[in-house]
Amino acid sequence: MAKLSREDVLRIAKEKKVRFVRLWFSDILGFLKSFAITIRELESALEDGMGFDGSSVAGFARIDESDMVAKPDPSTFRIFPWKANDHVVAVMFCDILQPDGKPYQSDPRWVLKRNLERAQKMGYTFNVGPELEFFYFRNSSGKPELLDSGGYFDLTPLDVASDLRKQAVMVLEEMGIQVEYSHHEAAPSQHEIDLKYTDALTMADNTMIYRLVVKEVALKNGVYASFMPKPVFGINGSGMHTHQSLFKGSKNAFFDPKDKYHLSDVAKHYIAGLMKHAREITLVTNQWVNSYKRLVPGYEAPVYISWAQKNRSDLIRIPVYKPGKELATRVEYRCPDPACNPYLAFSVMLAAGLEGIEKKYPLRDPVERNVYEMTEKERRRHRIETLPEDLWEAIQVTEKSDLVRRALGDEVFYKFIENKKVEWERYRSRVTDYELEQYFSVL
C-alpha cells in the first residue's frame, strides 16, 4: 500500500465524507489508546498534533509533567470499517511528542523507530511476519467456554468460528492489511490469521489493528475473542511466532545459496544474537504472569534455547517451505505471545539480532532432535539453556540486561520493570482456586 502524505489524507477524507478521525497510540503495555477529533480539526492535527493529558496512560508522564502531543502519522490513515451513527470514521496512528516537539521517550512507537534507525545505519530494513493465535469463547465472564472442538487445520461448521475468521480477514483486507492465510489451530476453539510480512513499524501498527478487529468482529457476533497466552488449562496456549529477516535493498541479507542451510553469515550471527539474549528479552516478548503458564513443556511452546530447521521444539526455527528461495529465507522466533506490546517486542528481538551481527557471535550447531525428550544431562551437554520459568525470574534476568535497557531506553526500561514488579506482587499475594481446591479441605 502506497504511503499517504498529509495532502492525500485531507483529499481522501473529503472524498469519503469522513466526519470523525480516531487518533491511536499505544501505552507501554501494548494497550491501544484512542481519542476522536472531528473532521474540522484534521488539518490542524496533521500540522501541529493534538494535546492530551498523558498522566493516566500506563508508563507515560507523571502528573506534574502530563502535557503530551499526539501527532498523526498520515501514512497510517485508513477508513474504519464500522461507522458511528452512520458517520464515516477514519483512523491514524500517532507519534507522541513533548510540548517542545521532541519525541517522547516513553512512546513505544518511538522506541521501535530508534531501533529501526540502528538497523538502517547498518544498511538493513527489518521485515517481520507474526503469526498471532487466539481463542473464541462464548463470553468474557466466568469460566471460558469453547466454541468448537476442532483441531489443527480442521474445517469447523461455517456457523461457528470459520465464518468469524472470514469476517475478520475481510475487514483487515478492507483496511489495507494483507492476510496470507487463516486456519483453525491445534487447540479447540483456537484460531490463527497470518499477516503478510512487511517492515516492522507497519507490522507493529497492523498487529494493533489485527487484535482490535478480531475482538470487534467477535463482539458483533455475540462471542468473545481472547489473546490471553494460556486461557485454558490442559490445552495449548496462544503464541505469536515471529518470522523476521533483514534486507539490503531488494536483497535478503539472510540468504546464501551456497550454505548448507541457505543462511548467510549475517543470518547466523543474528540467530546467535537471539539465542544469547533470549532470556533477557523474554520479559518483553512474554510480559504477563499468564505468559509463563504457556511456556511449559508438552504444549508445543518453546522452552529450551536452541535452533533447527524442521524441529518445532526449538526456540528458533528456519522454515523450509521453499528451500533455496531467497525471499522465503527467514528466522522464526517462537516464544513471543500475542499479548505482548509489538513495538517493544520487535525492538528487543531486532536489538538482540543486531548485537549478534555487530559482535559476530558464533552460531552453535542446530538441534534436530526433540529437545523435550532429551534428559537434563543431554541438554547440558548441548549447552541448551531454558527460558525463564515465571514472571519473577524474567524480571530478575531483564533487570540486569544492558541490551534491553539500551533497546528500550532508560525511561521505558525502568517503567516497564516497575510495572512488572507490581504485577508480580499482586499475583504472588493472591489466593488462587488451585490452592483452595488442593488445601482448604485438608489443612
Image (spheres, rainbow, N blue to C red):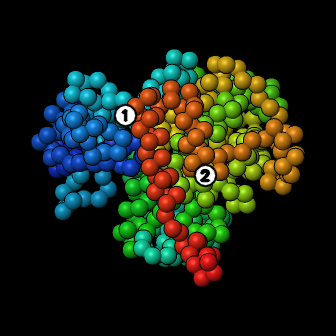
Q: Residue at (24%, 24%) from the top-left corner?
A: 101
In the figure, is residue 60 to the left or right of 128? Answer: left
* Viewer-side label of 1, 2: 2
Question: Relative to the observer, which residue lies in front, 267 or 74?
Answer: 267
* Residue at the disc numbered 2: 390
* Residue at the disc numbered 1: 106
Q: Give coordinates of residue 368: x percent, y percent.
A: 83, 45
Q: Give coordinates of residue 384: x percent, y percent.
A: 78, 41
- Most distant residue in the left direction: 40
SS for dot 1: loop
Q: Amino acid type of disc 2?
A: Asp
- Above or below, 240 relative to 220: above
SS for dot 2: loop
Q: Give coordinates of residue 187: x percent, y percent.
A: 63, 67
Q: Give coordinates of residue 6: x percent, y percent.
A: 25, 31
Q: Residue at (69%, 61%) from the top-left corner?
A: 299
Q: Residue at (65%, 38%) from the top-left corner?
A: 278
**Circle 2 residues within 10 Å: few <14, some 14–19, many ≥20:** some
How far apart in space, not on screen, are marks 1 and 2 (Cα)? 26 Å
- Most distant residue in the bottom direction: 441
Q: Residue at (23%, 48%) from the top-left corner?
A: 35
**Circle 1 residues within 10 Å: few <14, some 14–19, many ≥20:** many
Image quadrant in which you'd find residue 383: top right
Question: Relative to the observer, which residue lies in front, 326 or 318?
Answer: 318
Q: Is residue 9 visible?
A: no
Q: Amino acid type of disc 1?
A: Ser
In the figure, is residue 72 to the left or right of 247? Answer: left
